Amino acid sequence: MAKLIDMPLGQGEIWNVNFPGCELEECKGVLWDRTVSMDVFYNDSYNETKLADGRVSYMVEGKRNWEATEGTDLRAILDNYVSVGKARNIS
């Protein structure tokens, strides 16, 4: 993170840093210049249940997506790397 402080950013850019969900010993390193993935982390669907009193209950069923495009932040963290790249600040 200290290295990023002195690295230049363009107008409206921010650093996008993502950490894998693994133990530190399993982290393979840092991958630079990752793009923001358009792939989803979970493929969600919803199960609808009609209750006895007439109300409706919705339960999310999230299935973990292990696929991601090469060169993206999501592919990096799925492969146990820290991902660093630039993103456009949308605010």
Image (spheres, rainbow, N blue to C red):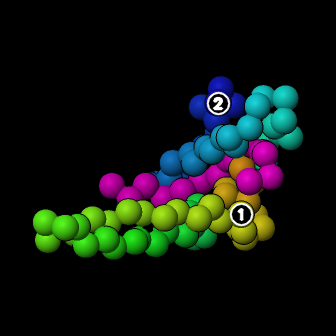
Q: Which residue is mark 2?
A: 1
Location of residue 50 by image quarter: bottom left
Is 23 or 15 nearer to us in this picture?
Answer: 23
Q: Amino acid at mark 2?
A: Met
Is residue 85 rendered to the left or right of residue 43?
A: right
Location of residue 74 by image quarter: bottom right
Q: Is residue 88 visible?
A: yes
Q: Which mark is residue 86?
A: none
Residue 21 image offset from top left, x and y in percent: 68, 40
**Quadrant the N terminus occupies:** top right
Relative to 29, say whether 45 is above or below: below
Q: Is residue 37 visible?
A: no
Where are the magenta residues, as a range? 78-91
Q: Which residue is mark 1?
A: 66
Q: Give the secondary structure at mark 1.
A: loop
Q: Earlier in the sequence, mark 1 or mark 2?
A: 2
The residue positioned 14% from the left and 71% from the top of the image is 54
Is residue 60 rendered to the left or right of residue 43?
A: left
The residue positioned 77% from the left and 67% from the top of the image is 70
Residue 71 image offset from top left, x and y in percent: 75, 64
Q: Residues within 10 Å of mark 2 (few under 14, many from 20)?
A: few
The residue positioned 50% from the left and 53% from the top of the image is 13
The residue positioned 43% from the left and 55% from the top of the image is 89
Relative to 43, say whether 22 is above or below: above
Q: Give the secondary structure at mark 2.
A: loop
Residue 87 image offset from top left, x and y in percent: 54, 56
**Quadrant the C terminus occupies:** bottom left
Q: Amino acid at mark 1?
A: Trp
Is 40 or 37 nearer to us in this picture?
Answer: 40
Foreground mark, 1 or 2, reads 1
Query: Residues under labels 1 and 2: Cα distance?
Result: 27 Å
